[in-house]
Amino acid sequence: MITCKDFLRELNDFLDETTDPVLRAELERHINECPNCWVICDTTKKTIQVYKGMEAQNLPEPVHERLMSMIAKKKPGCCGGGDTH
Amino acid sequence: MDHEHPEVTSATDPAAAELALVDRARNGDVAAFGELISKYERRVYRMARQITQNDEDAEDVLQEAFLKAFGHLDSFQGQSKFYTWLTRIAVNESLMKLRKRKSDRTVSLDENIETDEEPIVREIAVWDDNPELRYSQEEIRQILDKAIEGLKPIFRTVFILRDVEELSTEETAEMLGLSIAAVKSRLLRARLQLREKLTRVFKRKGEQILGYAK
Ligand SMILES: [Zn+2]
């Protein structure tokens, strides 16, 4: 019998779809019967989705410019850039 | 299309095209390396900002990461993706910044957290349908950044690598020098903490918040 604590412990693997089929079936049965765990599962899944869906912004123009001019001054393979170790 | 024309396939394959760029950059072609920068600078900068939580550090990380990558292209074997290799360098630089800046406080990634302790869940409420449609892209970005900012470095770094950069558990563990089990338990906590924070913003109005059964 799966408890809410068990469910929470398995939530990651459940969301990443790495649980084995037997356990997965038990977890699915649990969320169908337990509204709390269903909500937690659903909102955690949405949390991950909203982060994955966020596109990286363009760099502030000066940041991009400074990066490009630093690279332009370097030759590959010679000194590893700012690596002074 | 199929195995009859492997050479055609490889020429149009983005991974092969990228390796060709890396090859040109390795031979001193700055323009080729510039293409790689244009492709990945936004992600590297975002990751560095999220980990360090500091614009100045993020810019340093960005520059150091690309300079080191350019300087060490010879050691890039092409077994992993170029971005994964670049990420590894950028993560190291970010962690160094973090340690330097917060040396007076406890931010060690190796920090001993009680992995047996039950994760905490307080807010349980259904979200609005597609809450992201009710906010502008910029507002969403701020909401997400603010939520991440509130996480301890050990949690947010794991979350960023696994769920934002979409690295595997194994890659994340290796980059951070953590065990697989540690990555998993930190990821769970990070996800639940973020879920909690976002629920406060995205929960359906008027919806009763359920109490979690003990
Ligand atoms: Zn439950």
Image: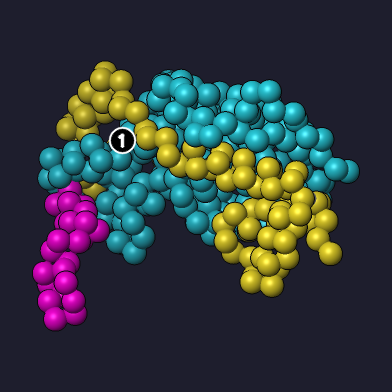
Residue A9, image x and y in percent? 74, 54
Q: Residue at x 46, y 42 (%)?
A: A52
Residue found farthest to the front: B206
**Would residue B75 be visible to someone looking at this image?**
no
Q: Residue at x 56, y 48 (%)?
A: B176
Pick the residue in front: A69 or B163.
Answer: B163
Residue A55, image x and y in percent? 37, 35
Q: For residue B165, what is the image quadrant?
A: top left
Residue B182, image x and y in percent? 67, 52
Q: Amino acid at mark 1?
A: Glu
Residue B188, image x and y in percent? 66, 47
**Would residue B39 be visible to someone looking at this image?**
yes
- Asked whether, in this view, residue A36 is left or right of residue B25, the answer is right
First to last magenta residue range: B1-25
- Asked whether, in this view, residue B93 is left or right of residue A39, the answer is left
Query: Which chain is displayed in yellow in the rendered image?
Result: A
Q: Colour of chain B?
A: cyan
